Image: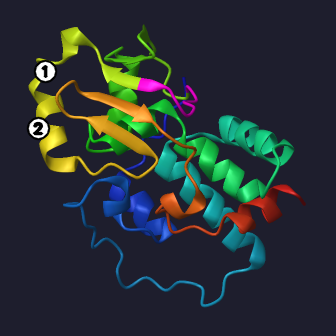
Amino acid sequence: MAKNREPIAKHAKSLGISPATMGYAKKTTTRNTNTQTRRKKSEYALQLQEKQKVKFVYGVLEKQFRGYYEKAVRMPGKAGENLLIQLESRLDNVVYRLGYAATRREARQMVNHGHFTVNGKKVNIPSYQVKPGMVVALKDSSRSIERFKQNLEIYHVVPRWLEFDENNMIGKVVAVPTREDIDLPVEERLIVELYSK
């Protein structure tokens, strides 16, 4: 399986986003602060940067991202918003949004290791698409792991399209996320323009 092993702070700086967006609030970089950059980027460069930004934040590689785009085009509504909604509805992102993990990468690993159930069935596929009405819960055998408790204390800020029962450690998807719920600073129309060429 292909993996992106580039340093987080370096990649975030090259895309012009804060490492805090990735969940790395303490990471900063002062590397190459005096480099000269091109004053004006071409239209293609802007489109490519927006695509790379979204891929980087959600941890998706090109082939899978292209599949999400093609599915988004076939769905009713705006293709760019549909693309972001699909990415936001991934199981690893839902685990991150519920506060079980500090970063999406950590959430992906937790899902891979089989710590979560969806509607009572173990799911270890990070790209699993959750839908309204689905219940995401921490497995009984994983509830004693200290890391989950620490993360829930620190990172537990649930968006309005999710509900969370703290006593039972159960999250529920109550609605499809909207564009307003996605706090990612990206212009999705540029991604659509890039792929529609």
Please tell me which residue is depicted at 28% across the width and 14% down the height of the picture.
139
Identify the element where label 2 is drawn: helix
**Does residue 182 show up?**
no
Please tell me which residue is depicted at 57% across the width and 55% down the height of the picture.
54
Please tell me which residue is depicted at 60% across the width and 85% down the height of the picture.
38
Q: Position of residue 94 (x, y in %)?
A: 43, 38
Q: Position of residue 98 (x, y in %)?
A: 32, 40
Residue 150 circle label = 2
Q: Quadrant of residue 162?
A: top left
Q: Which residues are magenta?
A: 128-135
Q: Is residue 170 left or right of residue 54?
A: left
Q: Position of residue 23 (x, y in %)?
A: 30, 53
How many numbered callouts? Answer: 2
Identify the element where label 1 is drawn: loop
Dominant SS type (magenta) = loop
Q: Is residue 165 left or right of residue 4?
A: left
Locate the C terminus and report the quarter of the image it occupies: bottom right
Mark 2 vs 1: CB contact within 8 A: no
Label 2 environment density (alpha carbons within 10 Å; few <14, some 14–19, many ≥20): some
Residue 145 circle label = 1
